[in-house]
Image: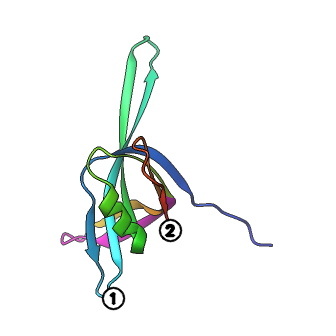
Amino acid sequence: MASRSLNKVMIIGHLTRDPELKYTAQGTALGKFSVATNRTWTNDRGEQQEDVEYHDCVAWGKLGEICDQLLSKGSHVYVEGRLNTNKWENDQGETRRRTEIVVNEMNLLGGGDAPAGGG
């Protein structure tokens, strides 16, 4: 019997910049944007601490076009998808990696706008 696995990501945060929309040579839309998530906690000395994580997101097809139309820098958004890591070699021969969220659902929060999904 094959073992099961799960690759699912859910984040709520704010866009760090306006989305960027491109099209592949085959005409498929590709929307790219970045979402910041914040975490706060109190350390052992009772001091409040904060950490920010930045998440690169990609949305394909109609969802990519919807993200480009509805989202802008500062938008409060729920994103659901899977992690995908790309690996390449730079000009200096160093192996580089970039992990991004491949979005399959996006909901604009706080504005009463209709949720968008697909992928």
Q: In this view, does 1 lie above or below 114?
A: below
The reply, left or right, for residue 41 in relation to residue 75 is right
Which residue: 56% across, 57% down? 8
Q: Nearer the viewer, residue 107 or 85?
A: 107
Question: Looking at the picture, which amino acid does disc 2 mark?
Answer: Gly
Q: In this view, does 41 lie above or below 110?
A: above
Q: Residues within 10 Å of mark 1 (few under 14, many from 20)?
A: few
Farthest residue, direction right: 1
Question: Looking at the picture, which amino acid does disc 1 mark?
Answer: Gln
Q: Distance between the residues labelled 2 and 1?
A: 19 Å
Which residue: 35% across, 49% down? 35
- In percent of width and height, residue 9 lies at 52, 54
Quadrant of res 97: bottom left
Determine if the magenta segment contains residue 67. Answer: no
Which residue: 27% across, 68% down? 21
- In percent of width and height, residue 41 lies at 45, 24
Q: Which mark is residue 118?
A: 2
Instruction: Provide the major secondary structure of the magenta segment.
Output: strand
Farthest residue, direction top: 45
Q: Residue 116 carries which label?
A: none
Camera-near label (2 vs 1) is: 2
Here the colouring is: rainbow
Which residue: 24% across, 51% down? 17
| Part of the protein shown in magenta | 81-93
Farthest residue, direction left: 91
Check disc 1 and report its element: helix, strand or loop. Answer: loop
Q: Residues within 10 Å of mark 2 (few under 14, many from 20)?
A: some
The N terminus - image quarter: bottom right
- In percent of width and height, residue 46 lies at 44, 11
Determine if the magenta segment contains residue 91. Answer: yes
- Residue marked by disc 1: 26
Q: Nearer the viewer, residue 1 or 19?
A: 19
